[in-house]
Amino acid sequence: MINRREFIWLLGGGALSWTSALRAQQSGQVRRVGMLLGVSATPYTTGVVDKFRAELKALGWIEDSNLKIAFRWSDNDTAKAQIFAKELVAMQPDLLIGHTDSSVAALRQETTTIPIVFITVSDPIGLGFVTSISHPGGNATGFINFEPSFGGKWLEILKETAPDVKRVAVIYNPATAPRAGLTYLPAVQAAAERYQIKVVSAHVRSESDIEAVLSDLGREPGGGLVVVPDNFITGRTPLMVSLLARYRLPAVHPYPYFPAGGGLMCYGVDPLDNFRKLPTYVDRVLRGERPQNLPVQLPTTFRSIINVKTAKALGLTVPPTVLVRADEVIE
């Protein structure tokens, strides 16, 4: 479940916020920001964005006063992302914010000069967004959500929780997570060799593809699933939970809303962590700092959640070692 503490936003030092606000008000200049989000506008996601806007306000950026933000929601659709990226760049904003790999890729395709701050991106070097973590270069910087080593950790946790797993599919949509295989699969395969587990890369582009993969995986005992960061997949969590229950497959997921929605477990970053940090870089760029001089930030907050009810339905007994390490246990 999502805890209340996940919605607490750090407002920073009072003196710093007051000084920033005063400077912004005195300048009289209106800054324009375009924000392209890779998900759908739901009560949860719009609530997260509202927290981001509140933090910007605390830093002195008042919408309809010295700040205007144009929001676009791509609904996990790469074609929409490309259309909206063109719209936002045509507005010639002072700053662009890209959320997810596909959104940032679409923005970068349209401009290499307008500053971009990205969030929820997995491999900014491999995707060509930056040249290095410490010295991004170019017009983009931001916040990584997962590192490649997570791939091995996901498989280890899955095997520890479901010791009979012998075949594992790593599922993702190559259109919305183009670097997923190169980023996470090597670490998954390295861990699989230690456990003598067969790993396959499962590419899906539709809901029917997802069902076909899980149906095939569930034909024989010993199947399991690793879900890597991919908005196409995570945006279909209810479908995934339903199919995994039907085919009695244990799965590990990167985000907390999977076990909260009836999935088995997750291990990964706090999904709100990037949004908590985002306003600091937005503020710095709007005040004149260049993205190429702002290092890409790595994740610092991690969460492990296990749904014991789901484990029992799958015939699993969760080991005490897994339970004791969990940040949350759903009964």
Image: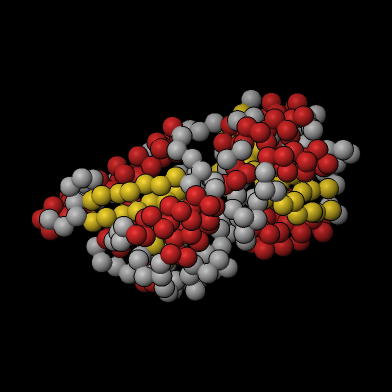
Point out residue 287 in the picture as x, y percentages from the top left corner: 24, 62
Can residue 273 be seen at all in this image of the molecule?
no
Q: 62 above or below 290? A: above
Residue at image position (56%, 36%) is: 257
- On-image quarter of the C terminus: top right
94 with respect to 256 (left or right): left
Nearer to the camera, 237 or 167? 237
Q: Residue furthest right?
A: 220
Give percent across and percent down for residue 131: 49, 74
Quadrant in which residue 246 is drawn: top right
Q: Say if 280 sits above or below 42 in the image.
A: below
Looking at the image, residue 152 sits to the left or right of residue 129; the answer is right
Left or right: where does residue 72 sit relative to residue 311? left
Q: Tell me if I can see residue 173 in this picture.
A: yes
Q: In which quarter of the image is residue 196?
A: bottom right
Q: Which residue lies furthest to the left in this view?
A: 26
Question: How far across and down, in percent of the image, does residue 93 sit?
Answer: 30, 59
Residue appearing at x 74%, y 38% in the figure: 211
The percent coordinates of residue 190 (x first, y second) are: 76, 61
Which residue is drawn at the image coordinates 56% and 62% (left, top)? 123
Residue 97: image quadrant is: bottom left
Q: What residue do we see at 74% from left, 30% from top?
A: 245
Horizontal side of 183 relative to 201 (left or right) equals: left
